[in-house]
Amino acid sequence: MYGPVGFSKHEVIYLTLPLYHASSVNLALHNVINVGATLVLREKFSVSHFWSDCCKYDVTSFQYIGEMLRYLVNQPTDPNENRHGVTKAIGNGLRQDIWTKFKRRFQIPHIYEFYGSTELPASCSNLFNVPGSVGRLSPLIRYFTNLILVRIDPNTNEPFRNQLGRCELIKTGEFGILLARLTDKVTFDGYLGPPSDTSCRIIKDVLEVGDFYVKTDDVFTLDRHYNLWKGENVSTAEVSNVMNAADFILDTNVFGVEIPGCEGKAGMAAINIKDNEDLDGSKISELGHLCREKLPGYARPRFLRVQQQMSLTSTFKQQKTDLVKDGFNPSTVREPLYYLDRSTDEYKPLADEIYQEIINGQLAM
């Protein structure tokens, strides 16, 4: 990637992410070796030292992931934040709303967002500074890559098959699942564990008889300029942005939880309250009003979980897996829980007896 983003031997790349992470090796370390640039390593990410380090070591670019840039945007003004010489930021997981705020406040000319997966032969990069996009997939680019976007079957959330048994490419403005074609040179080694974990990823006869593709399970859409937008969490991002507008909320993590006897998943939001804020009844009512005003009924979270500290992975991505496993059982979740009372359209404390009514189907969600 060093060629397209203009890396040279004069580059000073600042890295605060662990080197065991694939993107740290591929984007930072490999680029440094390829062009003979300088790599500045910090043991772990520090908001308070970030801009002072950039000034001290004459940093020209840095790598981000997950929520790093949101932390920087949410910090008070640092006298070093406009004295640095950083011209490029490269990484993934940057939300569109944070992108615009970050670029405007810290005067970073170029942000290069990419999409990729450690185990899958599928990746793309936004080299055109389009806020929120992860790349382009025009007909010409598609000809030279192994990536396609195919329509989704709304009943199964799997690739749609027409009467001929083939998948269909999406049109601009539609949402589709990203597939990567497998060839003699582009392979997929699969996963450790049961063979079914690997076989469920591979689909055949997609566009023609005998072809093989690996399914990413990530959903994207294309605009009229063929910019590629990650749509996997479009609804969750919308919910997060609305709830984050409440002045007492620091961040929101939206995910789905299963309710016995119900199809699909119910929306749940883990909310992180700002320091020195107490979540009383009036604030819960305010949050409910905000959701009613800004979100369609189907998008409003059915459950709330109040966290003093947001659950994050070691690379600063929001941790959803453990939250999904925890669910909404008040006997096992030790943090405050609320449910959406459909009779009053308000969020109310979730007690054990209410939980039993929900899982027994006595209380509709």
Image: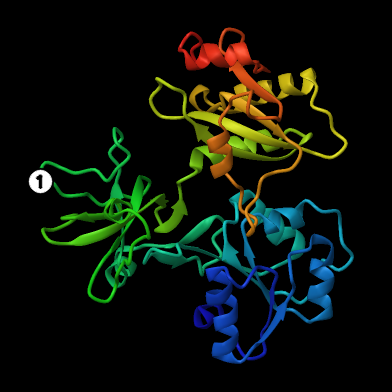
Density class for disc 1 (Cα within 10 Å; few <14, some 14-19, many ≥20) is: few
**Residue 280, relative to residue 238: is it above or below?**
above
At x 72%, y 19%, the residue is 285
**Residue 359, relative to residue 16: is it above or below?**
above
Q: Is residue 147 visible?
A: yes
At x 79%, y 19%, the residue is 282
Residue 363 image position (x, y, % from top left) = 51, 10
Residue 335 image position (x, y, % from top left) = 71, 30
Colour treatment of the image: rainbow
Query: Closest to the observer: 80 or 224?
Result: 80
Query: Closest to the observer: 138 or 337?
Result: 337
- Is 122 positioned to the left or the right of 317 in the image? left
Where is mark 1, residue-wise?
164
At x 76%, y 38%, the residue is 308
- Is 194 positioned to the left or the right of 104 in the image? left
Q: Is residue 170 visible?
A: no
**Residue 241 appears in which quarter of the rendering?**
top right
Residue 178 image position (x, y, % from top left) = 35, 55
- Is 108 positioned to the left or the right of 266 in the image? right
**Residue 353, relative to residue 333: is it above or below?**
above
**Residue flagged by tag 1: what amino acid is it?**
Leu
SS type, badge 1: loop
Residue 302 image position (x, y, % from top left) = 56, 23
At x 57%, y 42%, the residue is 322
